[in-house]
Image (cartoon, rainbow, N blue to C red):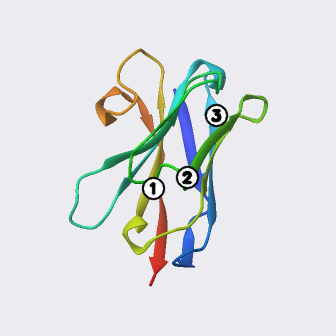
Amino acid sequence: QVQLVESGGGLVQAGGSLRLSCAASGRTFSSYAMGWFRQAPGKEREFVVAINWSGSSTYYADSVKGRFTISRDNANNTVYLQMNSLKPEDTAVYYCAARYYSGSFYSAQSYDYWGQGTQVTVSS
């Protein structure tokens, strides 16, 4: 079992920045690929970004490329999402997810564990 706890969400003006953190506990954190997904009201959960177990490979949704950066600190069991140049359309609940087995980095169905989510609201 892995427990994931997100933090760092909040209200920010368009063009601003936020950094989300996801703290993991349980099984060996470095064994997991990690991802961030988001869900806006009335919309399906969508892929945002993912990182492999070592941090050597990252994967981004087109909508966030060049603005968001994922990183991980395996020594401290934490993954980060740095979000810059935020837009109102980035408003959503952001979820951290962990994937132990192989599968698509982009598909929510590939992830085994999920956090409770943190709200990000970007005002125009």
Which residue in the structure is indicated by mark 2? 68
Q: Is residue 112 visible?
A: yes
* Location of residue 83 in the rendering, given as x and y in whole percent from the top left corner: 58, 59
Looking at the rendered structure, which numbered label has been put on residue 25?
3
Picture quarter containing residue 28?
top right
Q: Residue at (51%, 68%) from the top-left corner?
A: 86
- Amino acid bearing label 2: Phe
Q: Residue at (55%, 41%) from the top-left corner?
A: 4
Q: Residue at (47%, 42%) from the top-left corner?
A: 49
* Location of residue 6 in the rendering, given as x and y in whole percent from the top left corner: 57, 52
Which residue in the structure is indicated by mark 1? 94
Mark positioned earlier in the residue sequence (3 or 2): 3
25 sits to left or right of 92:
right
> What secondary structure is marked by label 1?
strand
Mark positioned earlier in the residue sequence (2 or 1): 2
Q: Residue at (72%, 29%) from the top-left corner?
A: 74
> What secondary structure is marked by label 2?
strand
